[in-house]
Structure formats: C-alpha cells, structure tokens
Image: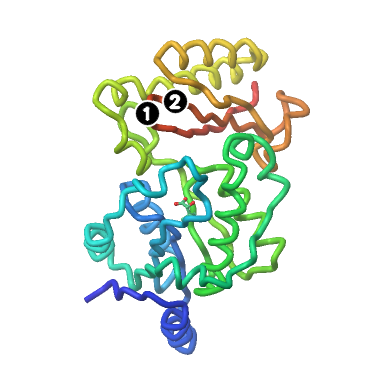
Amino acid sequence: MKPDTVRTRADLKQIVDEWRRSRLTVAMVPTMGALHAGHLALVRAASEAADRVVVTLFVNPKQFGPAEDFGSYPRTEDSDRALLAELGVDVLFAPSAAEMYPDSFATSVSVGGPAEGLETAFRPHFFSGVATVVAKLLIAGMPDRAFFGEKDYQQLLVVRRMAADLGLPTEIVGCPTVREPDGLALSSRNAYLDARERAAAPALHRGMAEAAERIRSGEPPEPAIADALAAIRGAGFVVDYLEIRNADTLAPVADWRKDPLRMLAAARLGRTRLIDNIPVPNPA
Ligand code: PAF
C-alpha cells in the first residue's frame, strides 16, 4: 500500500531510477514530520506538478542548537504516513540519522546571501544544517521540483540559493503559508502553545498585517513597525526580530517605495518560538 516507506538513499535511488526509465517526473516535499495542513498543501501542489511524489521525513539534528527542541520535537511517523496515504503519495523517505550522517560524516554546506541576519542572528547553526540536509535529500532523490512553504521564507530563499549555487537540477518551488482562521501560521511547534498562549498567538500576524497595511497606504515603515512591536509585545511576546527586507534577496531595503518588500518576524511566547512573514505591498 502507498506510500512505500524507504529508509536508505540506495533504495530511494533505485525507485527513482525506475520512474525515470519510464519517463515519469518526480516532485519532493522535504519535511520533519508532524504533518499539518500546511505540509498537506505542499503535497497537493507537488502531486499536481509531477507524476510521482516523494515526501521526506527526517528530524534533522544538524539544524537544532544544543538548547533547542530536538529531543522533544514531535515524532508521529505512523499518523503522518496515514495522511500521506490519503493524498496518494508514492514514497515516504524516512532515513535514520546514521543513514544521513554516518560516523565519518565531515561536510557541511554554508550559505551566505539570504542566510545573513534575521534567523541567523539567533540560530547561527540553523541554515547550514538545513542546507546540508536539503542538499543531501535533493541529491538522493534528484527530483524535478521540490516544494517548501513560504512560512519559512528565509529558509526558502536559502535553499533556492544553495540549489542554484551547487548546480542542482531541481526547481525550488515556494507555496503560500497556510493559516488558522484567526491568522496564526500553521506550524508543528504550535502544539507547544498552552490555551492562554494559543489565544494570544494571533497577535503576531495581526500586528504585522496592520503595519503592512499602513506602509501600503504610504506611511514610512519605522512608525508602523514600532507600533507593531508594541502591540506584539503587549500580547506577551518577546520579539527576536521584526524587520522589513528586500523580498527577493533579504538584503536591507534600499527604497521602501519601490523595492519588493517582505516583513519577517520571530518572537517567543513562553517556551514556544514562532516565526512568520508577509509580503508588504509598495505604496500605490
Ligand atoms: O522546514 C523544515 O521542515 C525543515 O527545515 C526541512 C526543510 C525539512 C529541512 O530539515
């Protein structure tokens, strides 16, 4: 019964090689599991874009810092597999840590450009861990396209930069963030929020959306961002960053009236760290 669960890169290659001989196209959706509707939207987009779909499930130790939640990150492979079966996914690639990083493993992929600042200022290990594992996954499956959520916007741009710079033949496709009706972006880490925190959490997106609207209507970014920060802090968040960057490169904004703009934030509510981002329309 689909999906076939595959544990080794050699077995994945064998299956993909067979598909290739039949001239079938292949899409990949890399995940760390604990699948929610945001992941399932990526899987649906992948299914529409290719003949065969591989979903990867690997909680990647290299992208967690020593004080982060690697040990407690939700691991729900059986229920994830059931969700993927409903969507007709062909292969679930769920390797062990030893398969991905044998004892002798000594390489890491380091990305500049869009990886500079924002998340990197708070999680310096993060993008090198992501770029290393995603490079390995793409090399293992050689998909035509790989799908990533815009929810992790900086990650999306880092992966796109890495794939282009290493000459990997995979198109990196970004898909819109899926939100709860109250605006909270779906994330596996939302499961950490208690009832009080869950009620406060939409203030992050609300503050950002109000600031974006003020900028769209012609106000300069600084006061709009200052008010958003005050509102988000007022809801109980400790804000790591709330910034507007060039949406294409994540470089600092040169001209906020003309540059493509993206607002990105990370903030902590109790022990849960949430990230979010939205496009900021230029003033008309
Ligand atoms: O976004 C994620 O779930 C992870 O960072 C990814 C891309 C699967 C790499 O481990």
Image position of 169 with respect to 205: above or below? below
Q: Position of residue 222 (x, y in %)?
A: 66, 14
Residue linked to disc 2: 205
Q: Amino acid at mark 1?
A: Gly
Describe the element under mark 1 as helix, strand or loop: loop
Q: At x 46% / y 57%, what residue is drawn?
A: 60
Q: Quadrant of residue 206?
A: top left
Q: Amino acid at mark 2?
A: His
Total numbered badges shown on the rendered structure: 2
Describe the element under mark 2 as helix, strand or loop: helix
Q: At x 64% / y 61%, what residue is drawn?
A: 108
Q: Position of residue 122 (x, y in %)?
A: 58, 35
Q: Is residue 172 left or right of residue 220?
A: left
In the displayed image of the protein, which residue is found farthest to the right?
A: 254
Label 2 packing within 10 angstroms: few (<14), some (14-19), many (20+): many
Image quadrant occupied by the C terminus = top right
Which disc is residue 183 wearing? 1
Mark 1 CB within 8 Å of ligand 1: no
Image position of 266 with respect to 37: above or below? above
Q: At x 37% / y 58%, what residue is drawn?
A: 43
Q: Position of residue 52 (x, y in %)?
A: 40, 73
Residue nearer the viewer, 160 or 219? 160
